[in-house]
């Protein structure tokens, strides 16, 4: 009787970079649509923002932000939290963000709350359309992981 390989039994070890990288097909996401993928055990929301969401995000001044830092792993650590620094150059409609509240690690609900972004139902933290904390106990903006568009319709999160 033939033995099953490690791949067939699910016991094969994956290289660390394979577990840490996720490719996402966004071809079906029209403006106003989101999807959530798992990356490093965390939910990452990929959202194609509407024109209104982009305009709302751009209209916020740094002085209005509870956390004025972008929290974008693709930029220097001290990059300001303006809307453009929460997206990718030339792809400003797209938000790719770890969907975890920075207060207690809860999962905020999308397109909710006073700012039309994300609302954490546990303690009331409210994030805007760019995932920046605007109200409530959360101390920081939701994190933007390292990501890049590898084509017009595919994003690699690493």
Image (cartoon, helix red, strand yellow):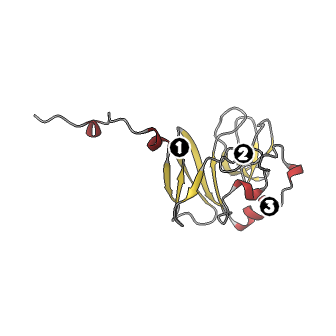
Q: Residue at x 70, y 44 (%)?
A: 142
Q: Residue at x 71, y 37 (%)?
A: 102
Asked whether the residues under the numbered discs 2 and 1 touch, taking CB atoms below 8 Å apart as contact, a structural biologist would say no
Separation of disc 1 and disc 3 at Cα? 28 Å
Asked whether the residues under the numbered discs 1 and 3 touch, taking CB atoms below 8 Å apart as contact, a structural biologist would say no
Q: Earlier in the sequence, mark 2 or mark 1?
A: 1
Separation of disc 3 and disc 2 at Cα? 16 Å
Q: Which mark is residue 58?
A: 3
- Left or right: 26, with 13 as reference point: right
Pointer 1: what residue? 39
Q: Residue at x 46, y 41 (%)?
A: 19
Q: What element does badge 3 sit on?
A: helix
Q: What element does badge 2 sit on?
A: loop
Q: Dot 2 surroundings within 10 Å: few (below 14), some, or many (20 or more)? A: many
- Left or right: 127, with 148 as reference point: right
Picture coordinates of residue 82, whole percent (x, y): 79, 55
Which is in the foreground here, disc 3 or disc 2?
2
Picture coordinates of residue 107, whole percent (x, y): 63, 40
Pointer 2: what residue? 71
Q: Earlier in the sequence, mark 3 or mark 2?
A: 3
Q: Dot 3 surroundings within 10 Å: few (below 14), some, or many (20 or more)? A: some
Q: What element does badge 1 sit on?
A: strand
- Left or right: 60, with 75 as reference point: right
Q: Earlier in the sequence, mark 1 or mark 3?
A: 1
Separation of disc 2 and disc 1 at Cα? 17 Å
């Amino acid at each position: 009787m033939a033995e099953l390989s490690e791949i067939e039994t699910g016991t094969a070890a994956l290289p660390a970079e394979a577990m840490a990288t996720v490719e996402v097909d966004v071809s079906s996401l029209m403006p106003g649509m989101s999807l959530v993928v798992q990356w490093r055990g965390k939910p990452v929301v990929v959202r194609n923002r509407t024109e209104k969401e982009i305009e709302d995000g751009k209209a916020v001044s740094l002085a209005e932000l509870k956390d004025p830092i972008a929290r974008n792993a693709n930029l220097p650590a001290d990059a300001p939290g303006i809307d453009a620094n929460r997206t990718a150059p030339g792809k400003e409609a797209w938000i790719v963000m770890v969907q975890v509240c920075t207060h207690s690690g809860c999962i905020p609900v999308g397109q909710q709350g006073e700012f039309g972004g994300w609302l954490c139902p546990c303690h009331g933290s409210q994030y805007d359309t760019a995932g920046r904390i605007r109200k409530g106990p959360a101390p920081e903006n939701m994190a933007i992981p390292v990501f890049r568009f590898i084509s017009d319709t595919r994003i690699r999160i690493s």
